[in-house]
Amino acid sequence: MHAPTLPKLKKTPKRILDLVHLLFASLWLGGFTIVFACSIMLWTQTVDPVFGLATINFVQEVVKVCIPALMATGLLYGFATKWGFFSHGWVTAKWVLTIALVVSTALVPVHPLCLSGIVAGMIALFALSIFKPHKKAQKAPQRA
């Protein structure tokens, strides 16, 4: 029995999906970067603790919205585009890395110095999205 599939998205809906996915991914990366910077400033005592903690709490509320949105758009990519879930190793790697980042930040109290690893994971997600390792290049149509 085959896994359920959705009809493949046409050009405009696919671009809207791309836009929404990139918007939430940017908010997630930006949010983690802000939390990372504030955590370092709190740890080194170079920022007012009330301001630093308020900023972190606000950003975490924004990031909480991004994670389910990214998972939803990722599922749509998997079911309704040619990318699928396992047809490309980089897509599978993004799913594994995303789940690892979500679990590591949701279940374990994060020390400020550990946030650099989380930010590195976020950068790796973006790098996988941009460079798509082992993706076959498409041949350009021949012009007469």
Image (spheres, grey):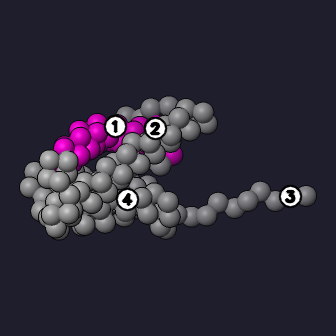
Disc ID at residue 143 = 3
Q: Residue at x 28, y 39 (%)?
A: 62
Which of discs 1 and 3 lies nearer the camera? The answer is 1
Q: Earlier in the sequence, mark 2 or mark 4?
A: 2
Q: Kindly give the residue lying farthest to the right in the view shown.
A: 144
Mark 1, residue position:
69
The reply to whether callout 1 and callout 2 are in contact (CB within 8 Å) is yes
Mark 4, residue position:
125
* Quadrant in the rendering for residue 119: bottom left
Q: Residue at x 64, y 60 (%)?
A: 138
Mark 2, residue position:
20
Q: Nearer the viewer, residue 28 or 89?
A: 28
Indicate the position of residue 80 as horizontal and vertical percent values. 46, 37
In the displayed structure, would residue 57 be above or below residue 104?
Answer: above
CA distance separating discs 4 and 3? 36 Å
- Element at label 4: helix
CA distance separating discs 2 and 4? 16 Å
